[in-house]
Image: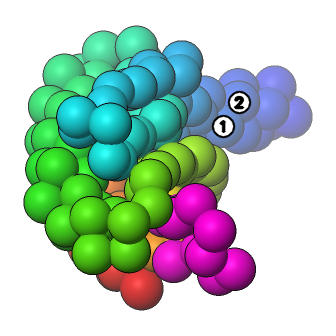
Amino acid sequence: AYQSAGSAASASASGSQTQAEQAQYTDKSYVGDVEEVSSYSFTLPEFSAPKSIADKLNTFYADVAQQMISYTQTDVYKKAQDLGAVGLLSGTYTVEQTDGSLKVTLSVSVNYAGAADAETHTRVDTFDPATGECTGTEKN
C-alpha cells in the first residue's frame, strides 16, 4: 500500500509539472531611429518553450514591438519635434510564471533630451500557459 501511494503521489506531481512547463525565452532587441528626432531601444521576450505556445507568444510580441515602433514614429517623433529635443523610447520586461498563468510585464519609458521627467508606461499581459491565449492586458 505504501508503494502504490508513493507512485500515485509522484504521478500527480509529474502531472502538475507537465501542465506548467516553464516558459523559456531569450531577449530580442529592437533598436532604430526615426530621422534624427526620435529613436527606440527595447527588449522583448522571444519564447522557445513550451513549443506548443512559443509561436503564438512570439507572434503576439512581434505585434507589440510593431506598436512600440509605430508609437516612436508618431507620438514620440511629434513631441520631440515640438520640444526641439531628441526623444528616446526604451523598454525592458520581466516574466513570471505561476501554475495558472504566465505574466509578462513591460516597462517602457520615453525620455526627451533636456526634459526632467520621463514618461513611463507599464503593460502587463497575462497568458494561459497551456494554450498561449492572452487572457488579459493592463496598461498604465
Check disc 2 and report its element: helix, strand or loop. helix
The circle on residue 10 is 2
Q: Amino acid at mark 1?
A: Ala
Q: Which residues are magenta?
A: 109-119
Image check: 91 left or right of 46? right
Of 79 and 47, nearer the camera is 79
- Residue occupying the point 56% across, 31% down: 22
- Residue occupying the point 61% across, 76% down: 115
Is the residue under label 2 in contact with that under label 1 (CB below 8 Å)?
yes
Q: Residue furthest toward the right? A: 2
- Residue occupying the point 58% across, 60% down: 113
Where in the figure is residue 140, as x and y percent of width and height?
A: 42, 85
Magenta span contains residue 113: yes
Of 131 and 2, nearer the camera is 131
Q: Which residue is mark 1?
A: 13
Q: Residue furthest toward the front? A: 84
Where in the figure is residue 103, as x and y percent of width and height?
A: 48, 58
